Image: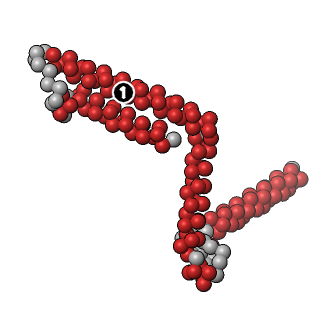
Amino acid sequence: MKNNNSYSFISYLLLSIAIIFIFSLTFKYKFRTAQNLSFRSLTNQNSNASNIKEGFIFNKTDTELVENASKIETDSLFKIIDNKLKGLMQELGGAEGNAETKKLLTSTKKICDLESAKCMMQMINDQKAHKIIDLENLMDDETNNNCVRCKKYTELSSAIDSIINNL
């Protein structure tokens, strides 16, 4: 019986030591993680250490920069614009994507034109009841839903037409 009690005492002792060891490791890990996450001081140190100038960055000295500033700015602006255009064309899918986009926009423009014509026909049908169709003031009625829809479809159609022409 005494032997059994000593084994249980030793096992409880080892278990308590293991629990204390695990707790200490978790607290150390938590502390290290908190230190690694406190990056404000590192950010301030890194941002104050480097000499960063806003604007265009050139690999020339200040005297050369002053002499050729307008030429360099123009060249770099053209490069930036060209890179932006190339990137946008790649986002559209290149030449094939450009053709697909034009086709899609052309179909959308046709839908807008047909919807606008449909609204116009409804407005004309509404005016037939008066036996006189006032075509001059037909598009001036802001309270008529068909008039508002017709104007919106017409604006959308002209915007899509402008986009198609620019592609």
Residue placed furthest toward the right: 3
Residue 111 lies, in percent from the top left, at: 40, 25
Q: Looking at the image, what colour scheme do you see?
A: secondary structure
Quarter of the figure with residue 13? bottom right
Q: Where is 98 relative to 35, above or below?
A: above
> Which residue is label 1 attached to?
113
- Is 37 located above or below residue 140 in the figure? below
Q: Is residue 54 visible?
A: no
Looking at the picture, how far across and down is residue 83, in whole percent? 60, 55
**Apparent side of residue 53 relative to residue 146 in the rendered image (left or right):** right
State the residue at coordinates (21%, 22%). Answer: 123
- Residue type at tag 1: Asp
Residue drawn at point x = 55 percent, y = 67 percent: 74
Where on the picture, by quarter, is residue 134? Answer: top left
Compared to 158, does 118 lie above or below?
Answer: above
Viewed as shown, does residue 94 lie left or right of 148?
right
Q: In which quadrant of the rendered view does residue 124 lie? A: top left
Q: Report x, y in % for residue 135.
A: 17, 26
Residue 60 visible from this viewpoint: yes
Q: Nearer the viewer, residue 109 or 9?
A: 109
Looking at the picture, tell me which residue is in the foreground, 145 or 128. 128
Q: Residues within 10 Å of mark 1 (few under 14, many from 20)?
A: some
Q: Secondary structure at mark 1?
A: helix
Q: Report the front residue among 103 and 31.
A: 103
Q: Is residue 128 left or right of residue 122?
A: left
